[in-house]
Amino acid sequence: MNGTLNYLRGGRRWIVAGVTVHGLESSVDFPLVMTEPGDPARVMFCLPPLGGQQQVINFDQLTDIFGNPLPQAIIAPVVIVIPRSEASCYLPDRPYETGFRICRDRQTAGDAVVDLFIMENDLR
Amino acid sequence: MYKLLDTSTAQTPTGLAFQRRLFRMKSGQYASRLVLLYADSASEMKLRWSDPPYTSWSAGQTIINDSADSSFSAFLDTSGDIHIAYTRQNSLDLIYIRLVFGGGGWTPGSPATVCSVGSCYFPSIVRSQSGELWCAYSYYDQSSSAYSIRIKSSADGGGFWTGGAQSPGMALSPDDTAIPYVNLSFLDNILHAVYCHSRSSLYLRKQTGSGGGFTDPLLVMEADFIDDDFDCAVSPDFKLAVAAAASEPSRLYFREYDGVSFGGLQEVSRIAADSPQVVYLQNTPHIFCQKTIGGSFRIPVVFRREGATFVESDLFGGIGYFDNVLVYDDSAETKFEDKTIQAANPAAGDIYHSESNALLGAAGDCLYLGKSRKFYTAAITLSTVAAGGNIVWEYFNGSDWVRFNPAGGDYYLDQQSKIVLLWVDLDSAPPAWQACSVNGIYNYWIRLRAQGEFTTAPVGSQIAAAHGGRLIGKMTEVS
């Protein structure tokens, strides 16, 4: 299937206006793995938050500019941040099916407001 | 997030401190995907992967089934392939295998023998920018009954290793009776080997050119005993950091090398630590480790460099000392007594109610364990073990105290020391568990309530929301 056909099939898109970004760049999740000894031992996955302020937005918390609530899950989502000011806001990692993390850089004083263009991308 | 992925019967499921096995893909369609390799049993290694937010993981895929029960080393390259060096069971040969990435999954290629003489253990494998593979390992020569660090390279992607499989490889360390350990890192595309010799001395040797020569050893630090408890990391501005935990006396050390000389040796802390993992986050060194707080009880902590010192903090709000430990004697005039300080230290026999002289003296007495965050363990050491009686475990659901059976099995204070697994992991604590006020203190509380009379009442020594965790492995990205 080519991209144009996929487009015509109706890949879903939303514009969400006025999202307040309070997450901080210094919010780092650093993955670790560890063993809890025992018989058997337990293999543990760890994702400790290290400082900063994490902001996670689930798609179903959002409403687009036409008043439509976004679905709970979006296949292979793409989230594009549309700035409203010179504040630098971005996604620190790839969005996932139910949401994404967003943050502003540390030079931005106070919360920042952005618009979001969210697109479903079922090309893969 | 603190999540159980699997159980394992291997000796070192998540490897030694200086070995890599958790990777994050940096770019492309699968950017941010995490891949974990671990020893599932004495002979099998498995691979699992997860995409953000990492709450669900793929089923374990067996990638190797002829491994010795010894830890392995791996790295992820820019194309998503994973390169592994491991010890083969029985022969104790050193084996290289590449897992080829395609379509979101990994397929094992053909194994190649790196070294088939002597016995090879604890490899460290890396790749240069030009694609040359390097593997260093602990080598045991049966004829001389001596250990040494050996190193080999492969210019053809792992098919042939210098000198052939019958060569033990170039010696990086002198012969010794104690097993040595080695970590390889590329600093500004120059290979650096940091190894522990005679259990207590960390040395650095770096490659002098493409011909395979190495500088004379530079002493990084000397402390009794380091063994495999060290790790290395390269900073964004090309410094090589070395963190090591020594056991006698208990010390955590840090030192940086700028490619020419070492900075001063820094004593990070005087804790007993396991598995230090050094990482540069936003160009600041962080050291993750397991802090021993008594017996086999450990708390995962992180040290972050701030100015000239390192600042310690718990890795998880739900794993650590309890914020409050209260003993409650139902028949006493002063029913609640605060034993938080006594519970935090391992001093013997100091956790009891002054009326009953016991942790729990009679039916209706309670032990309250409280923390501002939900927790998943109660690590308990007793000086006097309970006999007779009965104990129920309860949490508060917002309106009532609800009885539950600990996920790791019931515990009636009838063993001298036990880490009671309340829930499967930190993320599995019941959603219904609510914080509440006990004796005016607002916390998430677990209550142990006595039912029936004890023939011997228990007395406590240490109680913490600790676990027995070891063998931390840090995430790395591409090599």
Image (cartoon, coloured by chain):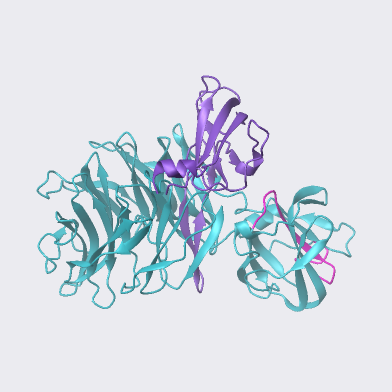
Chain colours: A purple, B cyan
Q: Is residue B197 visible?
A: no
- Give B431 or B187, whichever is nearer the viewer: B431
Quarter-wise, where is residue B208 in the image? Answer: top left
| Magenta stretch bounds | B354-375
Q: Is residue B362 magenta?
A: yes
User: With respect to residue B60, does B337 lie above or below?
Assistant: above
Type of secondary structure dominating the magenta stretch: loop
Total tally of numbered discs in the picture: 0
Residue B371 x/y as whole percent = 69, 52
- Give A19 or B168, whichever is nearer the viewer: A19
In the image, taking residue B243 as reference, residue B371 lies left or right, namely: right
In the image, taking residue B359 as reference, residue B177 lies left or right, namely: left
Q: Is residue B27 magenta?
A: no
Residue shown at the point (32%, 36%) measured from the top left:
B263
In the image, taking residue B359 as reference, residue A106 lies left or right, namely: left
In the image, taking residue B95 as reference, residue B320 lies left or right, namely: right
- Give A112 or B96, whichever is nearer the viewer: A112
- Hey, which residue is sitting farthest top in the picture? A86
Residue B426 x/y as whole percent = 61, 57
Residue B303 x/y as whole percent = 48, 43
Residue B8 x/y as whole percent = 46, 70
User: With respect to residue A83, does B268 lie above or below?
Assistant: below
Residue shown at the point (55%, 55%) measured from the top left:
B2
Q: Is residue B137 visible?
A: yes
